Image: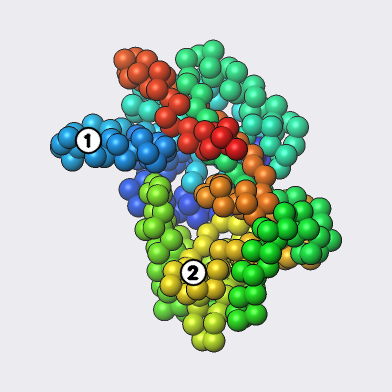
Amino acid sequence: MPAQFNQLEPQSLVDAFLTHPPHGFAVQSTTDGLCFFYTQFDLLTTLDAAVRQRIVDAFAYRYWSKLLQLSSCFVGTTVSEYSILPKNIQAAQLIEDIQQRGHKNTLTILKDLPLNSPLLSRAENQYSQQLIKLAKSKGFIAVEGQALAYVAIDFKDRDEYLSRFSKSRRKNLKRKLKHLQQLRVDIVATGDARFNDALFCAQLYQLYLNVYQQSEIHFDLLTADFFQQILQDQKAAGRVFFYWHGEQLVGYNICYLYRDNLVDKYIGFDYQLALQFNLYFVSWFVNLDYAQQQGLKFYIAGWTDPGVKARLGAKFSFTQHLVWIQPRLLRFALNRFKYVFEADAHWHAQQ
């Protein structure tokens, strides 16, 4: 595989996405390693929650909602934090290739281009800036993307990290962390023999579905086969953090050691137990402890729940999506109203 820009996760995770794509997705990749996926994209997916609800409540929504489902080609994957791009493709050539694919789809979207990310090199950030500038000159619409949470591992232990919070927040977090005393934490490498147990893997997949079903955004529903492949991968430097109360599995999260980072990818919860033991907060500090003990640079905590993660001390790296819209009238309309698709940017501005 040629060298890639913007990659924060092992290639085997991308390979699993290509082998077992999410439900309703068709995928392709080039010999250079550029990935594409095709799906019917619901325009309401990334709207501000309040705007989305007003549209859903509108008269006869169920009859005209299919008009919001557009045939779409995405450049990238849903398992990588940023859009992974081959280093050997010039920006002008990449934009031309994307426009060629755009003739067959209503939307063509180069997703999750990093904006001055501290997690990447100067060359990677400069390439993204070059792409964005060139694409906008060619008629692409730049839409603000989501907020990727991260924490720099620049503290010697948990107490030093907690000392950065206000007295009241520190007290609240310490109260929640007491639940860790009631849990057993197992950290298991992917490829371990226990992931050969089909019933255990089915249980883990169901806990993932619990999280997916309660999420506000339903876009990429990963398959059980995808999870089986990544859990049985011995070479990916994956770590699965299990949280047990007695013999009951409260929840887990799947992380990867890559480029001196701990990259948090997937979680699964038994929600009744997870809420009882404040597992979201407990697991955050267990992950930070592990990253610090391993001498890593960053804990990369994903895209969801930016408000909660900000209260836990995260900083954020933002992205842009470059959108090519084939019908000119639709291009004009969406350009006028693109701000309603930039929920995380609005949240960040309000902070």
8 or 243, which lies in front? 243
Q: Position of residue 102 (x, y in %)?
A: 40, 24
The crowding category of the residue bearing disc 2, from other C-alpha atoms within 10 Å (few below 14, some 14 to 19, many at least 20), is: few
User: Which residue is situated farthest in the right direction here?
Assistant: 156
179 or 255, which lies in front? 179
The reply to whether discs 2 and 1 touch (Cβ–Cβ < 8 Å) is no
Disc 1 residue type? Ala
Q: What residue lies at 72% left-to-right and 66% top-to-bottom?
A: 290
Residue placed under numbered mark 1 in the picture? 58
Against 347, residue 187 (above or below) is below
User: Which residue is situated farthest in the bottom direction here?
Assistant: 246
Where on the picture, by quarter, is residue 59?
Answer: top left
Disc 2 residue type? Leu
Judge from the rendering whether residue 224 lies leftward or rightward of residue 120; answer left or right. Answer: left
Q: Position of residue 261 (x, y in %)?
A: 71, 53
Judge from the rendering whether residue 111 lies leftward or rightward of residue 10; answer left or right. Answer: left
Image quarter where the N terminus lies is: top right
Q: Which mark is residue 275?
A: 2
User: Which residue is situated farthest in the front direction here?
Assistant: 168
Q: Position of residue 66 (x, y in %)?
A: 22, 36
The crowding category of the residue bearing disc 1, from other C-alpha atoms within 10 Å (few below 14, some 14 to 19, many at least 20), is: few
> In the structure shown, which secondary structural element does the residue marked by tag 2 occupy?
helix
Mark 2 or mark 1: name the one nearer the start of the chain.
1
Against 139, residue 341 (above or below) is below
